[in-house]
Amino acid sequence: GAGVSQSPRYKVAKRGQDVALRCDPISGHVSLFWYQQALGQGPEFLTYFQNEAQLDKSGLPSDRFFAERPEGSVSTLKIQRTQQEDSAVYLCASSLAQGLVNQPQHFGDGTRLSIL
Amino acid sequence: DAKTTQPNSMESNEEEPVHLPCNHSTISGTDYIHWYRQLPSQGPEYVIHGLTSNVNNRMASLAIAEDRKSSTLILHRATLRDAAVYYCILRGGGSQGNLIFGKGTKLSVKP
């Protein structure tokens, strides 16, 4: 079956440009998470959605980062006025239900963002 | 969620068992122990989870110490495709579900 799909797979942008990263979760999955992974590090939490509601955005590093999931399925992570420190792999994950610690998260393969 | 400690790297020979340790001395009674792995250029992949009892699935086994302060992920016969970074993660009963990753253990498998 279809897993979590992220696009684009790679994105190169010049410093100062805006970028938008897309995540298509597994159909029917209520919870959606965004993570940021720097080179050689484990993923770090950015934000969490339950359906269309953004319940936690405590991990977003600055107000240049914005995420939405307007219809409770596809999500977009937008970064405005990109900086070199935004270069990382951005991972999206979905899970069937909210907050259940037995529920595994299903990850996409990420978008590798490089800011020149 | 409580913190875990894992070795930075381990090596194994192909077709031999691999035991990946994880220490979590501050684990609480409601924390589940989850393992994920991340192959090169891919997103993390769920491997297994448990609470108190040892667990087996098609990918691996999870052995949990009686005091729950440590656990071991067991790959029964390592293959080259098992070369990855393995993350041991605690998930508390009151959490919203986001995972807190450490640096994990980078497993190398030699042919």
Image (cartoon, rainbow, N blue to C red):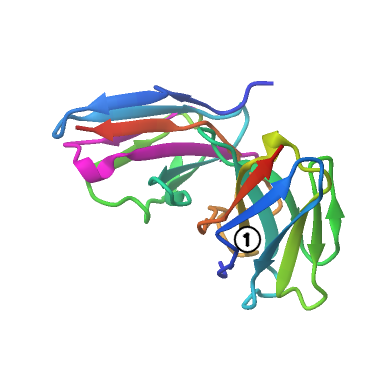
At a point 58% along the width and 68% down the height, the residue shown is B5
* Secondary element type, mark 1: strand
- Tell me what residue is drawn at x 16 percent, y 36 percent: A81
Q: Left or right: A113 with respect to B70? A: left
Q: Is residue A67 above or below residue A9?
A: below
How many marks can you see?
1
Q: Position of residue B3 (x, y in %)?
A: 55, 69
Report which quarter residue B22 is drawn in.
bottom right
In this rendering, position of residue A91 left or right of residue B14: left
Percent position (x, y) of residue A84?
A: 21, 41
- Verify whether residue A56 appears in magenta: no
Residue closer to the observer: A4 or A56: A4
Residue at screen point 20% across, 30% down:
A18
Chain ID, mark 1: B
Crowding around mark 1 (Cα neighbors within 10 Å: few <14, some 14 to 19, many 20+) is many
Residue span colored magenta: A74-96
